[in-house]
Image: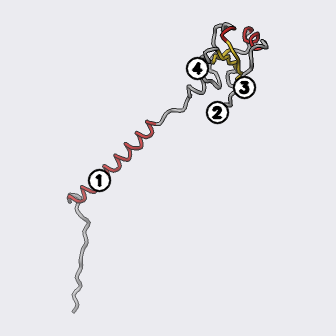
Amino acid sequence: MTRKETVSVQPPKPNCPTERMKVSVVALSLLILILTITSAVHSQPTFNVIPSEIPESVNPPPTCCLKYHEKVLPRKMVVRYRKALNCYLPAIIFITRRKREICTNPKDEWVQEYIKDPRLPLHPSRKLV
């Protein structure tokens, strides 16, 4: 008669130190992964408005304007101008002697007078980014 030996393989008990260590290593790895992802997401800049590309009334160098300069500029301070008429807020941008760029309303009477002056050159428009 042949005798059959039965070998039963039992999974390791959860109280076994090596199993607890494996669970701890997996949990720690997941925690590090989650922290890395969340810190990377929070460190990214927001792209709602880029101030250097869309200035308020005075900010060099503008491509489009967010609002108009309210006061009349002295004519002797303006050396040239540029048109930004295809923007959400159409504007005439005057460049001053100090190379500041001032956004103005193209419908204002004083703005129309300035751009009709033949001594005030039209500066080439910048490409919108």
Question: Quadrant where the N terminus lies?
Answer: bottom left
Per the model, the C-alpha gap separating discs 4 and 1 is 53 Å
Q: Residue at x 66, y 17 (%)?
A: 95
Q: Residue at x 29, y 53 (%)?
A: 25
Instruction: Name the foreground residue: 32 vs 19.
Output: 32
Give the residue type that dot 4 points to.
Asn
Contact, mark 1 vs mark 2 (Cβ under 8 Å): no
Of labels 1 and 2, the one closer to you: 2
Per the model, the C-alpha gap separating discs 1 and 3 is 63 Å
Per the model, the C-alpha gap separating discs 3 and 2 is 15 Å
In the image, which disc is placed on residue 25?
Answer: 1
Give the residue type that dot 3 points to.
Pro
Contact, mark 4 vs mark 2 (Cβ under 8 Å): no
* 11 w.r.t. 115: above or below: below
Contact, mark 1 vs mark 3 (Cβ under 8 Å): no
Q: SS at mark 4?
A: loop
Horizontal side of 64 relative to 31 (left or right) equals right
* 109 w.r.t. 16: above or below: above
Give the residue type that dot 1 points to.
Val
In the image, which disc is placed on residue 124?
Answer: 3
Can you identify the residue that label 2 sits on? 129
Per the model, the C-alpha gap separating discs 1 and 2 is 48 Å
Q: Residues within 10 Å of mark 2 (few under 14, many from 20)?
A: few
Residue furthest bottom as drawn: 1
Q: Residue at x 59, y 17 (%)?
A: 58
